[in-house]
Image: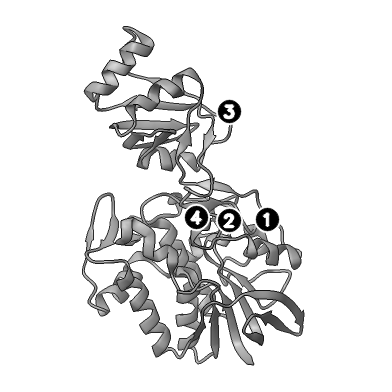
């Protein structure tokens, strides 16, 4: 079957791209390997979907090119997405620091996107595995549901984070197949592990949280951190983890001092004052616990205006598969909406 546009991946970015390209009277097919669409949307925000952040700025994102994402974020803003949410009468609230969550379940956001896709006459097929892609003028996809042809092919397959919901390296393989460069990929927004005597001792604090300034290199976040049976987690730790490299120290300045923490501190360090604490994490909990993937398709290979690859006309990359990674708090969804939106104007 022939379509104007085929999108691989029915997550946040892929669905948004489908909606926008369908509105432009393109014939659109979205292929999803899972049995349902939007699995990452469903589990996000504890099942309530932290769907954007009202304070989104380009500085809330990490990329080898700090300017690449500015264009898309300027052309589709948090307010633009909120407008769609309001139109569908989905109740939401601001939790903290500009983070917007559904009052109800995250399924409301998925249902909203599916209604928009239906209105734009977008064809969605689930349980579809793409086995090969070739280009001879048009793109030809061989899949478990047959062959499809298209003029524009959009890769919206996400990264490596949370493999239990179907994350794979498919998008990176497509980029390599067509000669595009990738930046190094690694887990982002991920708990850090602590080994050695100190790590073993601190495991007794599992479940204790404290407010702190947590610093890694030049970046610092003031939020809560949590001791776990493997090391450290909580918002402040997840934020700095995206900047952390093996061997780097993490500097913690506690703002609150829970009693159990004070007792453990005196056991470990005696009468030293609890003002600055330097830790050397041994690693991370990996992609299984990472909320996002750092790195991806090199932005130098893509147009920031259209998300189209420079070397291969008609091939687009959007969302997490691209080397643009947001901070914790709804920013990665905003990148998915924005990159999907802009690609949808040109495919």
Q: CB under 8 Å between callouts 2 and 1?
A: yes
Residue 91: name its quadrant. Answer: bottom left
Q: For the residue labelled by badge 1, is the local secondary structure a helix, a strand or a loop?
A: loop
| C-alpha gap between disc 4 and disc 1 | 20 Å
Which-is-in-front pick, marks 2 and 4? Answer: 4
Q: What residue sits right under mark 2 in the picture? A: 323
Q: Earlier in the sequence, mark 4 or mark 3?
A: 4
Residue 202: name its quadrant. Answer: top left
Q: Measuring 49% from the left and 66% from the top, which residue is drawn there?
A: 72
Q: 331 left or right of 124?
A: left
Q: 108 left or right of 340?
A: left
Q: What residue sits right under mark 1 in the picture? A: 182
Q: Measuring 55% from the left and 91% from the top, which residue is drawn there?
A: 27
Q: Earlier in the sequence, mark 2 or mark 3?
A: 3
Residue 171 image position (x, y, % from top left) = 63, 65
Q: Earlier in the sequence, mark 2 or mark 4?
A: 4
Rendered view: 313 above or below 2: above
| C-alpha gap between disc 2 and disc 1 | 8 Å
Q: What residue sits right under mark 3 in the picture? A: 247
| C-alpha gap between disc 4 and disc 3 | 25 Å
| C-alpha gap between disc 2 and disc 4 | 17 Å
Q: 196 left or right of 47?
A: right
Q: What residue sits right under mark 4 in the picture? A: 162
Instruction: Evaluate whether residue 278 shows in this view.
Output: no
Quarter of the image that includes the N terminus: bottom right
| C-alpha gap between disc 2 and disc 3 | 23 Å
């Amino acid at each position: 079957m022939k379509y104007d546009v085929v999108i691989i991946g029915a997550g946040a970015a892929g669905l948004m791209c489908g909606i926008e390209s369908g509105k432009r009277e393109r014939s659109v097919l979205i292929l999803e390997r899972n049995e349902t669409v939007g699995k990452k949307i469903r589990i996000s925000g504890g099942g309530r979907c932290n769907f954007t952040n009202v304070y989104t700025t380009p500085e809330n994102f990490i990329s080898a090119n700090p300017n690449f994402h500015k264009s898309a974020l300027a052309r589709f803003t948090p307010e633009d997405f909120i407008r769609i949410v309001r139109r569908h009468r989905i109740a939401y609230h601001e939790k903290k620091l500009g983070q917007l969550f559904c009052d109800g379940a995250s399924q409301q956001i998925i249902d909203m996107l599916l209604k928009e896709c239906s209105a734009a006459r977008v064809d969605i097929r689930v349980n579809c595995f793409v086995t090969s892609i070739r280009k001879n003028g048009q793109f030809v996809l061989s899949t478990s549901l047959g062959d499809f042809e298209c003029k524009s092919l959009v890769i919206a397959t996400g990264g490596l984070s949370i493999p239990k919901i179907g994350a794979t390296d498919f998008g990176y393989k497509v980029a390599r197949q067509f000669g595009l460069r990738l930046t190094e990929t690694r887990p982002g927004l991920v708990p850090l592990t602590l080994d050695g005597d100190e790590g073993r001792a601190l495991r007794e604090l599992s479940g204790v949280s404290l407010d702190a300034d947590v610093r890694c290199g030049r970046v610092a976040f003031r939020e809560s951190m949590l001791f776990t049976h493997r090391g450290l987690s909580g918002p402040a730790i997840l934020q700095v983890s995206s900047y952390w490299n093996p061997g780097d120290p993490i500097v913690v300045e506690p703002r609150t001092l829970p009693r159990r923490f004070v007792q453990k501190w005196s056991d470990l360090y005696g009468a030293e004052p609890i003002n600055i604490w330097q830790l050397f994490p041994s690693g991370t909990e990996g992609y299984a616990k990472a909320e996002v993937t750092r790195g991806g398709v090199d932005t130098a290979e893509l147009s920031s205006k259209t998300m189209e690859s420079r070397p291969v006309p008609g091939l687009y990359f959007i969302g997490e598969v691209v080397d643009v990674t947001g901070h914790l708090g709804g920013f990665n969804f905003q990148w998915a909406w924005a990159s999907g939106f802009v690609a949808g104007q040109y495919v």
